[in-house]
Amino acid sequence: MSDTIAAIATGTQISAIGIIRISGDKALTVIDQIFLPSSGQPMSSHEDRKLVYGKLMDSDGQVMDLCLCTISHGPGSYTGEDTAELQCHGSPAVLRQAMDAICRLGVRQAGPGEFTKRAFLNGRMGLTQAEAVIDIIDAETADVAKNAVGQLGGSLQKKAERIYEELTEICSHYHAVLDYPDEDIEEFELNQYADTLKSAQKQMQALLDTYERGKQMNSGIPTAIVGRPNAGKSSLLNAILGYDRAIVTEIPGTTRDTIEEKATVGGVLLRLVDTAGVTDSTTDKVEQLGVERSRRAMESAELVIMLQDGQAEEMTEEDRRLFEEVGKAPHGILVRSKADLNDRGHGELEGIPVISLSVRTGEGLDRLEETIREMFPIPSVPSGEILTNLRQADAVRRSLELLRQAEKSMEHGVTPDIVLTQIQDAMQTIGELSGRKTGEDITNRIFSRFCVGK
């Protein structure tokens, strides 16, 4: 990492402010050559993290912007290296010209996530903290952002390290007795650490239990909106989104294919699929294909919202068959439409919540939001201790299995050295979670998700 990198951190679109970041051994030398503080003193002589006003020069020594600059000396910077940051006016032309001047001085363009990758490699943050950076950037709900901020603050990292240290205590005691038999060290009895193993398993299981909901928080809950033709599915989708995404007419069969959109409902991110009307009576081949796709959407959905014409007092046979399909989904809601014409109230039918709703007046939308929020609660754990990606969950799952094997070995009277080997393997996987022990391929895969400039 001896080379110096730079990147436009704010993208290439027109904006009020455009930021360029530089990190590496040459960062301060380069900034002194392209930025002239109004004080007349070199930028490298100013205090860390203090904004300084001055002139930004191009490669020909011509002023191209009046802007602000700040520097940070390593190892106390974000990356652990000397860094500089320019806060320019957000003209893409100015930013490109500035990058050209910087690169002419021996600096190269940074790759995706390379600043944060350097922060990780230089010990400025752990792997879960680095992953939290991109989670904050990608956050689509307040709950996801809150959990990511907790992870960036080190909550998950610290929890993993605590468990790691508890297991280290077992191994260090065993090896101390083995290596120094003549020293006055308390005799090693494996069973005296049974509670430590149980505690570690309990903590790892609690982490693993958060993963399914954490995954849903990040990617959204697959949600199918279904119903017979002209039941009001597209109208409900538009009402949830707050704009006319789907075409709505009084003609049955207007929606022939699935329409997919994301929306936050009751604080829960949903991946909504508006489906074609489900009917057994159509002879239209295109409509039949739409019905088949609707059924596939139901089968893969975590939540199915069924629309029924609220003016009808009873379900039709087709409604009843569709309702039975809804009952097979992990979560289901029956929405009776047109509550402004016939409000039948809210309730429950065969264990499935029933909501009376009018997309015209908005009546019942708050009840729908409340119902969805109750169906998908946030795990009751400290902020930052919700697992949000497969890498984290896999490391916890493997370490938990190894700890269980160690406990079984202990119960069956297996020799301490074998049990300790299993515990050390568990520690290895916990180290993968925190980044204490991880391969280059895993590191590269994680940072490939990042945007350039971060």
Image: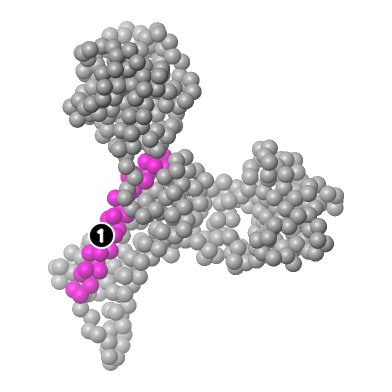
The N terminus, quarter of image: bottom right
Quadrant in the picture for residue 73: bottom right
Judged left or right of residue 115, residue 340 is: left
Report the span colored magenta.
Answer: 191-219
From the top left corner, tell me how far across and down residue 335 is, in percent: 30, 22
Q: Is residue 210 magenta?
A: yes
Left or right of 240? Residue 39 is: right
The residue at 47%/40% (across/down) is 140
Residue denoted by label 1: 202
Considering only vertical position in the picture, is 260 above or below 106?
above
User: Is residue 417 depicted above or below 216 in this figure?
Assistant: below
Q: Residue at x 36, y 55 (%)?
A: 382
Residue 291 in view in this figure: no
Residue shown at 44% from the left, 49% from the top = 146
Q: Which residue ends up furthest to the left in the rendered image?
A: 412
Q: Is residue 266 left or right of residue 15?
A: left
**Label 1 crowd bin: few (<14), some (14–19), many (20+), radius 10 Å:** few
Q: Main secondary structure of the magenta part?
A: helix
Q: How is the image coloured?
A: one colour
* Residue 217 visible somewhere in the drawing: yes
Q: Nearer the viewer, residue 173 or 214?
A: 214
- The picture places residue 104, in percent across and down from the top left corner, at 77, 53
Q: Amino acid at mark 1?
A: Lys
Residue sitting nearer the eye, 120 or 45: 45
Q: Residue 240, located in which quarter of the rendered image?
A: top left
Most extreme residue toward the bottom is 182
Residue located at (49% from left, 23% from top) = 243
In the image shown, does 217 or 197 lie closer to the viewer? 217
Q: Is residue 337 above or below residue 396?
A: above
